[in-house]
Amino acid sequence: QVQLVESGGGLVQAGGSLRLSCAASGRTFESYGMGWFRQAPGKEREFVAAIDRRGRTTYYADSVKGRYTISRDNAKNMVYLQMNSLKPEDTAVYYCAADRWGLGTQDKEKYDYWGQGTQVTVSS
C-alpha cells in the first residue's frame, strides 16, 4: 500500500514557475514508477510526466516538454514536478500516481495509487 500526498500548488502569473512535491508513504517507494497527471474542469485527466523507479527514464506530454521536469529522491520517498514558463492552459488539479510495475507510463489505467491532488492556477 502506498499513500501519496501532493503539495506546492497555488496561484501564479503566466510565465512563472511552481514546484510540486509528492510525498509517498511505504517502504517500497523505490520499486514504483511515478507519474503526474492533471485534470482541468470539464476535461478528462491527462498525462503530464512520468519517471521509472530508478529515475533513469522520464516521459513527458508534448504540451509540457521543455517546460516541466520530473524528478525523484528515493531516499526521501519524494517525487517532484518543476513547472516553468507556466501558461493559463496549465491550470488544473495536479495528481501524483504510483505504478507498481516500476516503469512509469503515460497510461493512467496502469497506475495503482493516487493522491488527492493539488490545485494549480495560472493567471494571464
Image: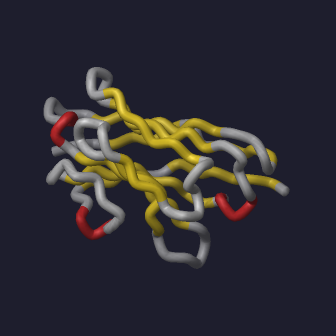
- Here the colouring is secondary structure
Quadrant placement of the C terminus: bottom right
- Residue at 46 percent across and 69 percent down: it is 45
Residue 97 percent location from the top left of the image: 33, 52
- Residue at 45 percent across and 58 percent down: it is 37
In this image, 107 relative to 69: left or right? left
- Residue at 75 percent across and 41 percent down: it is 16
Residue 93 percent location from the top left of the image: 55, 57
Residue 101 percent location from the top left of the image: 15, 53
Q: Is residue 115 visible?
A: no
Q: Residue lying furthest top in this view? A: 75
In this image, 1 relative to 121: left or right? left
Residue 106 percent location from the top left of the image: 35, 64
In this image, 14 relative to 80: left or right? right
- Residue at 66 percent across and 59 percent down: it is 91
- Total of numbered circles in the picture? 0
